[in-house]
Image (spheres, grey):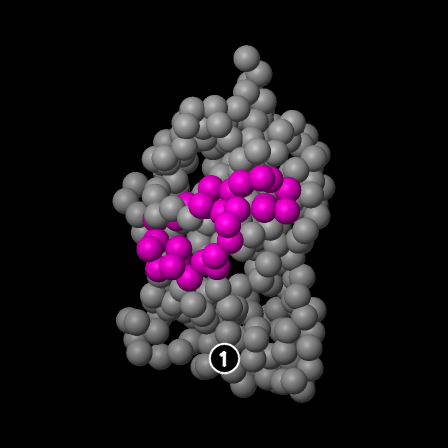
C-alpha cells in the first residue's frame, strides 16, 4: 500500500487542534511491559503519543512517513524522530518493549506492519493500536455533527475511515491478545471555535475544501451555533477509544 498523505498540508493546524490521549492509557500500557527501555510510536504524526511515552520509557523512536508532520513535532532529547514507513523501520531485531500506533493502524499495510512489529519487539513485548470515534457533546450538537460527518462529508472520507467507524474490529491483529483492557476515552473542554477548528482538520474537510472551494464546517456553522449556545461557553467534548493490545510470544 502506497503512503497516503491526508494531513501534511495542514500539519500545524492538526497539531494545534487535535485532542490528547488520556494519561491512564499510557500508564496501563506501561504496566503491561516487562521492560521500559524503548518504545516505538508508529505513524506518530505530530508526536502526541510519543510525548506521553517518554514518561514511561527511557527512549522513544517516533516515526511517520510525512516529513511535514515530523517537522511540526516538538524537540525532546528522549525522542528520536524519523521519517520512515510503518512497514520498514531502522530499529534492530528484538530491541523494542512497546509498539504503539495511535489513530494510524488503518492507514498501514497491516500484514507487513505486523511482521515488522514482530521483528523489532522483544519476546513477550507489547503492541497496542487504537483509534477514536466520533465526538460526542450532547444530542443537539451530535445531531449536527452526524449530518456533517455522514452526509455532507461522507463521500469525501478515505475508504480506510470505515475501520475507525468499526473500532478496528475487522482489522487483522496476529498477536496474543491482552484480555479485558480498560475502556478509555479522550475528553477536553472546548469553546465552539476550538470545536469547529478540530472538525476542519479532518481529511474529509480538507478534501471537500480542495475539490469544491467551500468550507463544509462553516456551512454548518449556524446549525452548530444554535445547538451549542453561547460560543464562548466551554463544553466537554468526548471521544471513545477503541483499543487492540497484544503480546509477542516468549522465546
Find disc 1 in the rendering and name its residue: 220
Where residue 73 sits in the image (x, y, percent)?
45, 58
Quadrant of image for the N terminus: top left
Identify the residue at image location x=30%, y=71%.
Answer: 210
Where residue 3 sits in the image (x, y, percent)?
30, 47
Looking at the rendered structure, the secondary structure element under dot 1 is loop
Please tell me in which quadrant of the rendered image residue 179 appears.
Answer: top right
Q: Compared to 128, does 198 lie above or below?
A: below
89 left or right, relative to 148: left
The verdict on residue 55 being magenta is yes
Please tell me in which quadrant of the rendered image residue 195 appears.
Answer: bottom right
Where residue 140 sits in the image (x, y, percent)?
65, 74
Q: Compared to 73, does 36 lie above or below?
A: above
Identify the residue at image location x=63%, y=47%.
Answer: 55
Q: Residue at the far top: name it.
A: 251
Where residue 118 sits in the image (x, y, percent)?
46, 25
213 left or right, relative to 42: left
Identify the residue at image location x=69%, y=43%.
Answer: 27
Magenta residues span 53-80
Q: Nearer the viewer, residue 221 or 143?
A: 221
Identify the residue at image location x=66%, y=66%.
Answer: 188
Q: Does any portion of residue 127 appear in the rendered image?
A: no
Amino acid at each position: 500500500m502506497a503512503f497516503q498523505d491526508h494531513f501534511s498540508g495542514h500539519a500545524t493546524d492538526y497539531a494545534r487542534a487535535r485532542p490528547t490521549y488520556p494519561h491512564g492509557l499510557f500508564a496501563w500500557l506501561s504496566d503491561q511491559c516487562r521492560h521500559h527501555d524503548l518504545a516505538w510510536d508508529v505513524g506518530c504524526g505530530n508526536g502526541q503519543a510519543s510525548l506521553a511515552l517518554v514518561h514511561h520509557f527511557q527512549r522513544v523512536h517516533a516515526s511517520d512517513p510525512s516529513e511535514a508532520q515530523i517537522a511540526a513535532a516538538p524537540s525532546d532529547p528522549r525522542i528520536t524522530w524519523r521519517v520512515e514507513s510503518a512497514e520498514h523501520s531502522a530499529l534492530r531485531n528484538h530491541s523494542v518493549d512497546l509498539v504503539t500506533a495511535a489513530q494510524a493502524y488503518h492507514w498501514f499495510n497491516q500484514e507487513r506492519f505486523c511482521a515488522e512489529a514482530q521483528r523489532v519487539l522483544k519476546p513477550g513485548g507489547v503492541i497496542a493500536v487504537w483509534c477514536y470515534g466520533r465526538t460526542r457533546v450532547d444530542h443537539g450538537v451530535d445531531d449536527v455533527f452526524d449530518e456533517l460527518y455522514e452526509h455532507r462529508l461522507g463521500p469525501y472520507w478515505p475508504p480506510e475511515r470505515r475501520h475507525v467507524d468499526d473500532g478496528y474490529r475487522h482489522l487483522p491483529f496476529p498477536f496474543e491478545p491482552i484480555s479485558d483492557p480498560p475502556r478509555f476515552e479522550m475528553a477536553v473542554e472546548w469553546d465552539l471555535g476550538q470545536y469547529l477548528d478540530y472538525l476542519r482538520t479532518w481529511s474529509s474537510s480538507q478534501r471537500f475544501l480542495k475539490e469544491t472551494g467551500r468550507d463544509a464546517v462553516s456551512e454548518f456553522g449556524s446549525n452548530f451555533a444554535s445547538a451549542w449556545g453561547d460560543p464562548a461557553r466551554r463544553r466537554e467534548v468526548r471521544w471513545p477509544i477503541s483499543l487492540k493490545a497484544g503480546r509477542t510470544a516468549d522465546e
